[in-house]
Amino acid sequence: MSFPWAEQYAPKHPLMRYLDEKLPIPRLVYNAIGSGYPVPRNLNYWWNFGVLAGVALAIQLITGIVLAMHYAANGLVAFESVEHIMRDVNSGWLLRYAHANGASMFFIVVYIHIMRGLYYGSYKAPREMVWHLGLVIFLLMMATAFMGYVLPWGQMSFWGAKVITGLFGAIPFVGEPIQIWLLGGFAPDNAALNRFFSLHYLLPFVILGVVILHIWALHIPGSNNPTGVDVQGPQDTVPFHPYYTAKDGFGLGVFLIVFAALLFFAPNLLGHPDNYIPANPLSTPAHIVPEWYFWPFYAILRAFTADFILPAKLWGVIAMFAAILLLFFLPWLDKSPVRSGNYRPTFKKFFWFGLVPCILVLGYCGGAPAEEPYVMISQIASAYYFAHFLIILPIISRIERPLPLPNSITEAVLAKHGESTDGAAVAAAE
């Protein structure tokens, strides 16, 4: 989408003019995150989390590259190499804790970013491709995080790898060969560790590439906004810089304060103590759990306990992957012409009192032991999760009577501050 009222890049210095002619990188940056990119004037702080996700990815890339210089992907010394990083490498403890807790912060930011998209209808036309590329990033993040969790080669790393790769064994006919191919053998060992280390190092750069596509796709239709109303002219927008660079800067400051508090005062809060025990194939942990950001999907996996046509394990694997894949179909499941949940009263109730508590309950049950009442609660929450997207949301989108939408973004902004568009026009004329 072109913005004819956007400020055009016009370099004044001879060197910048030459560079703009031969390699227009300054123009690209200016039009992407500078004054040349108009943004809806009513974006709130929920829109900060896209930038924060980019910062979190940068932290993971920088710390991960340095850590890879000292890590040894060998089952005999992997655990000791991590201890070497923690104890002997200059500031190694800081790098390792920043990388481990940075992954948690990355997922927190991305989960909030996704929930914001769900509430404000950012998956609706014309932003379907933006939504789909975001989900691809999420899937790549999950794969990268899982393989990274295996690398310390502690008890939870080893048994997590064994359990998760064992899920592929539930696939009829081809499951066992796929599992052996993934591990490079019949159990996690050196071959699996080398595979996971190689892919864990590679995939963040793939994520970076998809992020660039994600931003590119976003700049075509422009950003969504809390009203869901399309931009109608220059009065509805402000330049990204300095207005939203300042706003994102404040959000970044809050993010870094929280990150620093976690990093320096509770670096092991989100980890598992069993991962400080070297991997032992002969000693199974009492309670095998993945990292906390996988818990909702782990709860869905464990919710299937009885065979029905297919084995329960296979049903769990199908449901776990389907929980993410169905999000790709949201642009067609939700037929409402209104994007923003602020103007959809029924949708808003089911979102805040149905979907959000359901995901939180799944997360809690995923980290709990595989016993009653957690299994039964997981089954109920899993059933509601799929019902929300496949049944409730399509029905609501057809029968709901949305609230009246503002005529423009400017009208909504001025109404919020008790002003009128007529008064703004008079003030502009004066």
Image (spheres, helix red, strand yellow):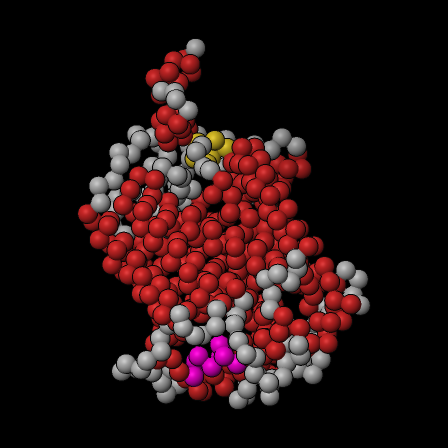
Name the residue at 37% across, 45% down: 120
Residue 67 forms part of the magenta stretch: no
Query: Image quadrant for the N terminus?
Result: top left
Using the image as rendered, state which of residue 70 and residue 369 is in the foreground: 369
Residue 168 forms part of the magenta stretch: yes
Residue 208 in sight from this viewpoint: no
> Quarter of the image holding residue 420?
top left
Name the residue at 73% across, 71% down: 83
Using the image as rendered, state which of residue 345 and residue 374 is in the foreground: 374
Using the image as rendered, state which of residue 35 and residue 104 is in the foreground: 104
Name the residue at 58% across, 35% down: 246
- Please give the range of residues in magenta: 162-169
> Quarter of the image holding residue 167?
bottom left
Secondary structure mainly formed by the magenta segment: helix
Left of 314 or right of it: where is 403?
Answer: left
> Quarter of the image holding residue 361?
bottom left
Name the residue at 33% across, 43% down: 341
Residue 267 in sight from this viewpoint: yes
Instruction: Check the image and report above or below for 198 versus 213.
Output: below
Residue 340 percent across, percent down from the top left: 34, 42
Query: Image quadrant for the C terminus?
Result: top left
Residue farthest toward the top in the current orientation of the protein: 430
Residue farthest toward the front in the current orientation of the protein: 373
